[in-house]
Structure formats: structure tokens, C-alpha cells
Amino acid sequence: MTSARRPKHTSDHPLPGDPDREEIVARMIRVDQAGEYGAKRIYEGQLAILGGSDDEPVLREMLNQELEHLERFNQLLTERQVRPTILQPLWHAAGFALGVGTALLGRETAMACTVAVEEVIEEHYTEQAEQLGDDEKELLSVIEDFRDDERHHREIGLKEGAEQAPAFPVLKGAVKAGSKLAIWLSTRI
């Protein structure tokens, strides 16, 4: 999100009805936990199809990092007493289905899914990092570290042939749109 589109509640002058600082941080933790859970399910779905192939080590490496991210956000949910999204059962099914569906279309399509999702998450973490202040140095550090991991996953997907997937631009656009919708919903619900 560019600074011109940044929500007014991140300024020094919130509007009536804008969430307070505590709610903004709670929403960040909620959506990030949901996103890491969804990413875990995507990689699990892809491994259900591509496991045992030459792609397994790459997918397993990315899954293991997502599991580390998820564990940290689960800790933050507990420590900060933030409720998780009520959409978790939906992300459980949708993430796995997206992983299976893209893997069934071939390794390049699975990697295209990775590129699209990780690109959105990288942008999302960058926006969050811009919103956090000095009072949230620990959370900022977590978000920046995880953003770097997600950027690395995107680079792996590109290196592994994502752009050779059939209809790559269309697939990438659809997965990105779905990911952005999931972020919007999980932030609020």
C-alpha cells in the first residue's frame, strides 16, 4: 500500500471510529497468524501431490519456514490475548485445495501459486512494518524477518519455473486477488 492509500488510522490524528493502536496491532497479529496458517496448508496440499518427486525438498523447506512463522504468531496470539480469525476452518480447506489444485496442474503452476501468494505477503508485511512504531520493536523485527523469508520463497518459485506455468499472468492475478481478500477478511473477522 502506498503512503497515499495508507489508512487514516495510522496517522497521528485518528478519526472517530478508527481502531486504536492496540486494536491495530491485534489485527496485524490475527491476520499474520491466519496467513501463515493458510501458507502452511497450501504447501501441505502441494506436497500431497508432489511429495516423493524432485520438488519435495524445495516444498518441504518452504513449509518448514511457514511452520516456524506460524508457531511464532501462535505464541503472539496467546501472549497478547488476541483472538484468531473465525475463518480458520475456511483457510484450512481453501489453502489445502489451492495447494492440491495448483500441484495437479504441474510443478510450474504450483510454483506460480507460491510466487503470487508470497508476493502479496511480502507487500503486506512491508505495509505492516511501515505502520509499526518504536513501541513495537519486537513485532517489527518478527515481521521484517518473515518478510525476508517470504521474499526468498517468491524467488525460489521464480527460479523453479513459475513463469512457465500455463496462463501465468492470469493465474498469478487470480491467486493474488484471493490472497488480498483473505487478508482483508482475516483482519476483521
Image: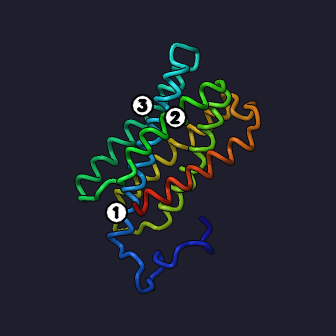
Q: Residues within 10 Å of mark 3 (few under 14, many from 20)?
A: few
Quarter of the image with the C terminus is bottom left
Which residue: 52% across, 74% down?
7
Residue indicated by mark 1? 26
How far separated are the C-alphas under marks 1 and 3? 25 Å
**Residue type at mark 3?**
Asn
Label whose residue precedes the other's in the sequence (1 or 3): 1
Which percent across, then down, holds residue 107? 64, 24
Picture coordinates of residue 64 (x, y %)? 42, 31
Disc nearer the start of the sequence (1/2): 1
Depth-wise, is mark 1 or mark 2 nearer the camera?
Answer: 2
Residue 45, given in percent of the width and then of the height, sits at 49, 29
Q: Residue at x 65, y 36 (%)?
A: 112
The residue that mark 2 highlights is: 97
The tag on residue 64 is 3
Q: Residues within 10 Å of mark 2 (few under 14, many from 20)?
A: some
Q: CA distance from mark 2 to mark 3?
A: 19 Å
Question: From the viewer's perspective, is the residue at label 2 or at label 3 nearer?
Answer: 2
